[in-house]
Image: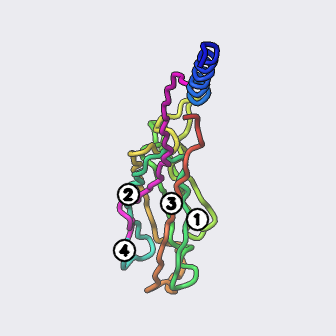
Amino acid sequence: MDLKKKLTMGIVTGAMAVSLIGGGTYAYFNDVETSTNTFAAGTLDLAVNPEQIINIANIKPGDWMYRTFKLENNGTLDISQILLTTNFTESVAGFGDHIMVDFLINEDKSSLLGPSNVIASKSLSELKNMSPDAVKNLSPKFFGWQGGENNGIKAGKDDDMHVVFRFNDNGLDQNAYQNATLELKWNFDAKQTAGTAK
């Protein structure tokens, strides 16, 4: 084989090797990072402590009953409102007209200027058509100052409540209500606060 053929063969062989290396593979720098993200919803968890606010027997017209209880926010989210609804069953029609809630006061929302009175002198029959906010600061304002805690209940906090029930003595014949019974259900409906930027 002459020199010219050897050179040509060498050049072709070299070119093929370079084309295999250059065309088949290539290299560059690279760096990959992974972001792992989580969304976890909070909880609304309202408790009434004690669950049974009143259990009384042998009442007569004129009797009154003072009780206390707590509204507890055991969840991880703040509560903006707690709407109170009243339902009852009565063994004698009209008995709910004679059982009064003289007051329901939220002690934590009250101030030196006066109580935060959620309910003031309403019969159970009247309350069936109402849904007051039990954690709203209703104490009076004085030159724009109100005192007491802000509306709602923060997570992990509670409000102290005071209530007086009374069997109204209307001065008339109330014999129809002897041995009458009434089962009261108060529902406390907690609402979340408005959404915010996180």
Give the Cα distance between marks 4 and 3: 21 Å
Front of the two marks 3 and 1: 3
Specify the amino acid type for callout 4.
Ile
Q: Secondary structure at mark 2?
A: strand
Q: Residue at x 61, y 16 (%)?
A: 2
Mark 4 or mark 2: whose residue is earlier in sequence: 4
Which of the two labelled residues, at mark 4 and mark 3, occupies the earlier sequence position? Answer: 4
Determine the CA span between mark 2 and mark 3.
13 Å
SS for callout 1: helix
Magenta-colored stretch includes residue 45: yes
Which residues lie in the magenta part?
26-54
Decide whether the magenta segment is chiefly helix, strand or loop.
loop
Q: Which residue is mark 1?
A: 127
- State the quadrant of the N terminus: top right
Mark 1–mark 4 Cα distance, whole angstroms, equals 20 Å
- Say which residue label 2 marks: 69
Q: Quadrant of the C terminus?
A: top right
Residue at x 47%, y 77% (from the top left corner) = 183
